[in-house]
Amino acid sequence: MKHSDNYYFDVIRYNIKKYRKDRNFTQQQLADRAGLTMNFISKIESKKMQRGFTIVSLTRIADALEIDIKELFDDKDYAVLFQR
């Protein structure tokens, strides 16, 4: 099934926030662990950043969350919650 570009960005945003909360990390803690700014993490999670994150930043975030990067692209939970 094909989705819009925004769908995929939203899935990644959703998963970053989900895994961050699962680990009880604040945005600042995730940013520190990933070597990014809290402002950057905040913008990703709030949709203020449109297409502004790279594979490098996603890799840093996945490493900081101690997950495989592919988990950020998994849309199972997102699709159920948002019925897309």
Image: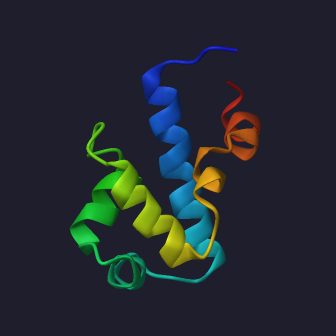
**Figure check: 52 above or below 58:** above
**Figure check: 39 above or below 28:** above
Nearest to the observer: residue 30 or residue 54: 54
Q: Give the tally of numbered discs.
A: 0
Horizontal relation, residue 48 to residue 1: left or right: left
Quadrant of the image occupied by residue 18: bottom right
Residue 60 lies, in percent from the top left, at: 41, 68
**Figure check: 68 above or below 63:** above
Q: Quadrant of the N terminus?
A: top right
Horizontal relation, residue 58 to residue 38: left or right: right
> What residue is drawn where x is 26% and y is 62%?
40
Quadrant of the image occupied by residue 67: bottom right
Q: Quadrant of the C terminus?
A: top right
Nearest to the observer: residue 47 or residue 71: 71
Residue 33 lies, in percent from the top left, at: 40, 84
> What residue is drawn where x is 66% and y is 34%?
82
> What residue is drawn where x is 65% and y is 54%?
71
> What residue is drawn where x is 57% and y is 18%?
3
Nearest to the observer: residue 81 or residue 7: 7
